[in-house]
Amino acid sequence: MMIVMAAALSLAATPAMASISASYGSDVSTPPIGDSNDDFDTETTSAPSGVPSSGSIDHVTWSIGNYGLSSDSIKAKLCSKDNGQEQCSPYNTGYKGNTSVFAGWRPTTKFYLKIQIVTDTYQRFQTNYTSRQSTHIEIYY
């Protein structure tokens, strides 16, 4: 059975679609406005209390809010710092991505996105609050 980790955990026979919001706040690393080709990180996801301690991750998907940039102007990779070491998927160009790099990892693994703006339009990204709030990660078990 595949389960999706989100704000609420579904144990239905068929997986329910849900997501964990990764928002941007003052405690996340962002490059100065105008810089490009610098990574900055979303906040780390938190596993809901209902996530079972047994089982493992199947795959992870993510979607970045539409910042008004062309899809080749933004890229992201999914990362985890669990166990004290950072491990990341390869970069994916565009607003959406998925990876099975973390297949088999424990269900409570915490993830974040490293996002890179590859044009000089960072100011538009930084000020687009609605799009930043629509960025999310979905973890499938």
Image (cartoon, helix red, strand yellow):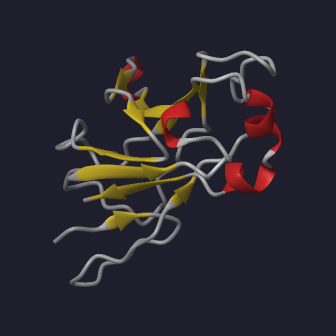
Asked if residue 24 is positioned above or below residue 73 in the image, the reply reads below
**Is 111 on the left-hand or right-hand side of 32?**
left
Asked if residue 33 is positioned above or below residue 66 in the image, the reply reads above
Name the residue nearer the viewer: 103 or 128.
Answer: 128
Asked if residue 139 is positioned above or below residue 45 in the image, the reply reads below
**Is 101 on the left-hand or right-hand side of 34?**
left
Which quarter of the image is occupied by the C terminus? bottom left
Whether residue 8 is visible, yes or no, is: yes
Whether residue 27 is visible, yes or no, is: no
> Splitting the image into 4 quarters, where does residue 3 fall?
bottom left
Name the residue nearer the viewer: 24 or 108.
Answer: 24
Asked if residue 64 is positioned above or below residue 12 in the image, the reply reads above
Name the residue nearer the viewer: 113 or 75.
Answer: 75
At horizontal 73% and vertical 38% (from top left) the residue drawn is: 125
At horizontal 73% and vertical 29% (from top left) the residue drawn is: 121
Which quarter of the image is occupied by the N terminus? bottom left
At horizontal 30% and vertical 78% (from top left) the residue drawn is: 11
> Splitting the image into 4 quarters, where does residue 83 fall?
top left
Name the residue nearer the viewer: 78 or 43.
Answer: 78
* Percent coordinates x, y for residue 38 in the rendering: 61, 16
* Percent coordinates x, y for residue 134 in the rendering: 63, 57
At horizontal 63% and vertical 24% (from top left) the residue drawn is: 119
| Total numbered badges shown on the rendered structure | 0
* Percent coordinates x, y for residue 52 in the rendering: 31, 61
* Percent coordinates x, y for residue 120 in the rendering: 70, 22
